[in-house]
Image (cartoon, helix red, strand yellow):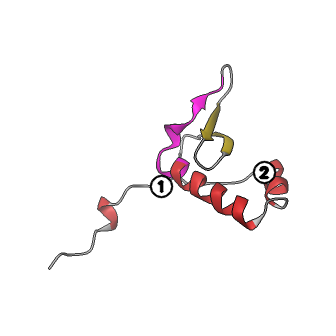
Amino acid sequence: MSSPVSPDHSPRRSQVVMVEPALSQLEKLTARETHRLDRTIVAISVNPELGTPVPDTLLRDYIDDVDGVRVIYYVTAFR
């Protein structure tokens, strides 16, 4: 019999906070588009380094070709 995985051993996910322009865009998405975006945000929260750095900024640009989603984001010191 196996024991449940301790929270100490699960991967740490980053906290995701949406800024106003992103919130406005969310209101225009269909349920299917929101679902695809959710999967992409989970992937980024698990590995914030997925995106490509945008030169001369703190921004990162991540494109999920499978789901057809592009997210531009930044990572803080708290991740």
Q: Secondary structure at mark 2?
A: helix
Q: Could you tell me residue 40's position as x and y percent? A: 59, 51
Across and down, in percent, residue 75 comes to: 59, 40
Tell me the crowding category of disc 2: few under 14, some 14 to 19, or many 20 or more residues within 10 angstroms, Cα based. Answer: few
Indicate yes or no whether the magenta region holds residue 76. Answer: no
Q: Is 58 rendered above or below residue 74?
A: above
Label 1 vs 2, first from the N-terminus: 1
What is the magenta range?
A: 44-54
Residue pictured at 72% horizontal, 53% vertical: 18
Instruction: Report the front residue among 2 and 31.
Output: 31
Amino acid of disc 1: Arg
Residue located at (67% from left, 43% from top): 71
In three-dimensional space, the C-alpha distance between marks 1 and 2, rounded to whole angstroms, equals 20 Å
Q: Which mark is residue 22?
A: 2
Q: Is residue 7 above or below residue 21?
A: below
At x 79% / y 58%, what residue is drawn?
26
Q: Pointer 1: what residue?
A: 13
Task: Give the percent coordinates (x, y) of residue 37.
Answer: 66, 55
